[in-house]
Image (cartoon, rainbow, N blue to C red):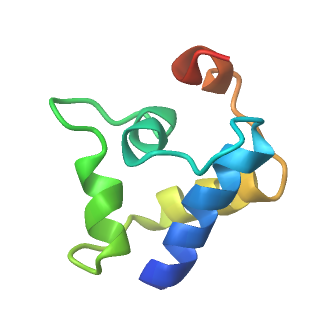
Amino acid sequence: MISPTELRELREDLGYRWGLGRPLQYKELGLVLGFTGRDVGQTPWRWERGQSTPQPVAITLMRLMRDGYKPAHVDAVLGL
């Protein structure tokens, strides 16, 4: 399990780690995680508010990214 607070901290940290100089936005996290649809940021937003729980694979991926893993598509998704 992961707390909403840890999810927020992970999202915020990724933006700085990837050189944005700011927290990663919900939509950006959704795109990095490969979400599709009209509002890809809605799911991470709900996670941080405790309205839903991320799948274990999403938690693992976010922790790996926090620890230094950067998926190849991140620069393209974030326009870096």
Q: Kindly tell me whether residue 52 is visible in this rendering.
A: yes
Residue 28 placement (x, y as % from top left): 46, 37
At 29% across and 76% down in the image, what residue appears?
A: 49
- Residue 11, picture quadrant: bottom right
Farthest front residue?
21
Establish if 4 lies above or below 42.
Answer: below
Q: Classify residue 26 as left or right of residue 43.
A: right
Q: Classify residue 43 as left or right of residue 74.
A: left
At 56% across and 78% down in the image, what residue appears?
A: 6
Establish if 76 lies above or below 62.
Answer: above
At 34% across and 36% down in the image, what residue appears?
A: 35
- Residue 71, picture quadrant: top right
Q: How many marks?
A: 0
Residue 66 placement (x, y as % from top left): 74, 57
Q: Quadrant of the C terminus?
A: top right
Establish if 38 lies above or below 54.
Answer: above
For the residue pair 20 and 54, the one nearer the viewer reads as 20
At 67% across and 20% down in the image, what residue appears?
A: 75
Farthest right residue?
68
Q: Kindly tell me whether residue 2 is visible in this rendering.
A: no
Q: Classify residue 80 as left or right of residue 50.
A: right
Residue 39 placement (x, y as % from top left): 20, 37
Residue 40 placement (x, y as % from top left): 28, 38
